[in-house]
Image (tube, rainbow, N blue to C red):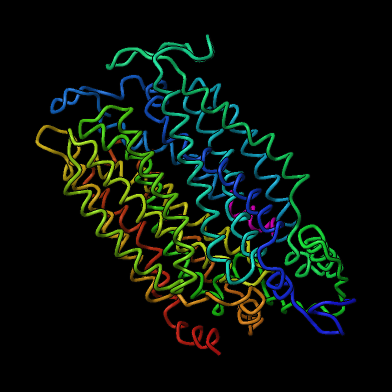
């Protein structure tokens, strides 16, 4: 370089240069671009939970009955699993999209993959507005989920590769607040639209559906038209976003990495330095970088840490978001009040996502995450005891508390994801973690529906005892705490290049293939017991074996990591602390 901090033939890394810039205009540009991508992403996911009762009534008009205790409409227990499946289809698409999108992002680049993902879920959300049967609707929820699942891990990875080290935790977690903002917008936009008794768009939303509750129009279709706006935003991303220097450097394009660093400096600091590619230090790549490498001895502890804790978070967040409106309708609130309570829950999530990064950077990733699981246990007990009919203000307070604690916990995992793997496999690691965890989310809406329909959780009048159902979440919260204490290794305060150097695999023969195959078999078992059987087997939720078998499916991944990761904890900690 001609002059400046890295002049005089001094070697440098991408992280050192980015850290030297500090927070710049480029930082805020990426923050805005990635944040908007997450807002659209969040809207696409949450819109089904906001409109699911209206969609369900369209496809299954006889799914609702009069609750003899409250005199209001409630979902019939026999339709609980089907209702939960409306959320499941999109989540299954997210599983597949995350698994493939993460690998592609490491191959073709962050910018290209994010642009493709945003365009993809915009294009395939549009047909859902025109669905006339559940099969058509479910198919396009599944396909659109590919794009949604690809988007989130790319955003997380881009934040980690763009932000100066000392601010990384704040920006990564704050970025997730945008996704939850999309959830809130889905409620603020979707609830008044879907609940409007008059057709908003003439014949398109005016098809009348008759249920036990009376008749209503299909304004929910407009919510999915709005969900197609990412088609426009994908074009904006193509022209406005820049590829990360980290990706260039770790894909053998040192000259482009240096050009990208010089471009950031010129655009935001109005100075011009020439960064010499010959002096750019790039941490060595791991011997293997595919999905199987995540289960090699070198990475399996990190994989165990983020897979188990994020699985817990996804199970609880997506499961409860799918059922909060039904829960409060069952307690005695109107459909609109119930959706409003869900929106309050998600509003609190924004506040938690904003704050979690500051605490994580201050006290460390592990302490922050461990404490959040304890807070979740306290919050769910309070909700179980104090949620009651005819006390809307108290329920709003409880939803604010629960939404804050639960989303704080799941977001506290986010900084650990990109920090757990080197650049060559970073987005593969992030994406596969998120993809697997969405098995928890996919299954949770069905599992909680099956639990709600189980005789052990029914009142004498034949309605669901939601106070007992929500207490079930204590089990995953406790597992999250245990796995945090066992597997999480502190990564805060280090640059991405420092972490990459520590994470380079030492044994090229250790491919992790066998462990990977076993894990995929466990994922298949989980899918069969917790997703396929409840949807396919007649009367599954009322079977005496249903809950034990679903518990086996959900707990099997934890048993796997306790067996395969525990023997390597001591050595892995030593490598990080060396």
Residue 422 is situated, as x and y percent measured from the top left of the image, at 64, 72
Considering the image in quadrants, where does the C terminus appear?
bottom right
Q: Residue at x 68, y 72 (%)?
A: 19
Left or right: 248 as drawn, with respect to 188 = right
Q: Is residue 240 above or below residue 525?
A: above
Residue lying furthest right in this view? 2
Q: Is residue 1 above or below residue 65?
A: below
Residue in the foreground of this view, choosing between 78 and 262? 262
Q: Is residue 141 above or below residue 278?
A: above
Residue in the foreground of this view, choosing between 523 and 399? 399
Q: Which residues are magenta?
A: 97-105
Residue 163 is situated, as x and y percent measured from the top left of the image, at 64, 64
Q: Is residue 14 visible?
A: yes
Q: Residue at x 25, y 28 (%)?
A: 74
Q: Is residue 338 above or below residue 206?
A: below
Residue lying furthest left in this view? 460
Q: How many marks?
A: 0
Classified by dominant secondary structure, the portion drawn in magenta counts as helix
Is residue 287 on the magenta stretch?
Answer: no
Quadrant hosting residue 270: bottom right
Left or right: 192 as drawn, with respect to 237 = left
Residue 216 is situated, as x and y percent measured from the top left of the image, at 38, 14
Left or right: 19 as drawn, with respect to 544 = right
Residue 236 is situated, as x and y percent measured from the top left of the image, at 73, 40
Residue in the foreground of this view, choosing between 23 and 432? 23
Q: Residue at x 26, y 50 (%)?
A: 547
Left or right: 146 as drawn, with respect to 87 = right
Considering the image in quadrants, where does the N terminus appear?
bottom right
Q: Is residue 537 visible?
A: no
């Amino acid at each position: 370089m001609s002059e400046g901090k890295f002049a005089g033939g001094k070697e440098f890394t991408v992280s050192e240069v980015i850290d030297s810039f500090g927070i710049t205009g480029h930082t805020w540009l990426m923050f805005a671009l990635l944040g908007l991508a997450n807002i659209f992403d969040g809207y696409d996911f949450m819109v089904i939970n906001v409109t699911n009762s209206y969609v369900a009534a369209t496809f299954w008009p006889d799914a609702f009955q009069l609750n003899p205790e409250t005199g209001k409409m409630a979902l019939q227990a026999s339709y609980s699993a089907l209702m939960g499946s409306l959320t499941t289809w999109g989540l299954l698409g997210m599983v597949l999209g995350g698994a493939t999108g993460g690998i592609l992002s490491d191959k073709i680049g962050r910018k290209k993959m994010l642009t493709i993902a945003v365009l993809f879920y915009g294009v395939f959300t549009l047909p859902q507005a025109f669905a006339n049967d559940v099969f058509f609707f479910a198919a396009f929820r599944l396909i659109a989920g590919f794009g949604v699942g690809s988007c989130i891990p790319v955003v997380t990875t881009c934040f980690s590769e763009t932000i100066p080290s000392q601010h990384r935790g704040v920006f990564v977690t704050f970025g997730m607040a945008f996704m939850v903002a999309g959830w809130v917008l889905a409620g603020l936009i979707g609830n008044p639209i879907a609940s409007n008794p008059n057709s908003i768009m003439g014949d398109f939303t005016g098809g009348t559906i008759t249920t036990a509750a009376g008749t209503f129009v299909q304004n929910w279709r407009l919510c999915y038209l709005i969900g197609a706006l990412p088609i426009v935003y994908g074009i904006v991303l193509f022209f406005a976003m820049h590829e990360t220097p980290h990706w260039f450097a770790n894909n053998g394009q040192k000259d482009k990495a240096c050009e990208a660093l010089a471009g950031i400096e010129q655009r935001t600091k109005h100075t011009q330095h020439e960064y010499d590619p010959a002096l750019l230090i790039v941490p060595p790549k791991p011997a293997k970088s595919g999905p199987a490498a995540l289960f090699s001895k070198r990475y399996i502890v990190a994989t165990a840490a983020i897979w188990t804790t994020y699985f817990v978070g996804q199970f609880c967040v997506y499961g409860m978001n799918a059922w909060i409106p039904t829960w409060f309708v069952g307690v005695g609130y109107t459909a609109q009040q119930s959706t409003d309570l869900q929106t309050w829950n998600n509003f609190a999530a924004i506040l938690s996502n904003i704050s979690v990064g500051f605490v994580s950077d201050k006290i460390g990733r592990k302490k922050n995450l461990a404490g959040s699981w304890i807070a979740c246990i306290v919050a769910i007990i309070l909700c179980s005891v104090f949620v009651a009919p005819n006390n809307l203000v108290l329920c709003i307070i409880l939803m604010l508390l629960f939404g804050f604690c639960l989303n704080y916990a799941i977001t506290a995992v986010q900084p650990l994801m990109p920090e757990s793997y080197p650049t060559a496999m970073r987005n593969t690691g992030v994406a596969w973690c998120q993809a697997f965890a969405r098995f928890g989310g996919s299954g949770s809406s069905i599992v909680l529906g099956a639990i709600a329909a189980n005789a052990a959780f029914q009142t004498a009048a034949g309605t669901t005892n939601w106070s007992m159902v929500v207490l079930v979440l204590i089990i995953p919260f406790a597992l999250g705490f245990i796995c945090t204490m066992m597997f999480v290794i502190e990564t805060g305060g280090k640059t991405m290049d420092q972490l990459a150097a520590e994470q380079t695999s030492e044994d090229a023969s250790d491919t992790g293939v066998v462990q990977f195959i076993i894990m995929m078999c466990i994922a298949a078992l989980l899918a069969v017991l917790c997703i396929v059987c409840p949807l396919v087997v007649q009367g599954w939720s009322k079977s005496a074996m249903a809950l034990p078998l679903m518990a086996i499916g959900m707990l099997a991944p934890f048993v796997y990591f306790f067996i395969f990761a525990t023997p390597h904890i001591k050595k892995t900690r030593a490598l990080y602390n060396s």
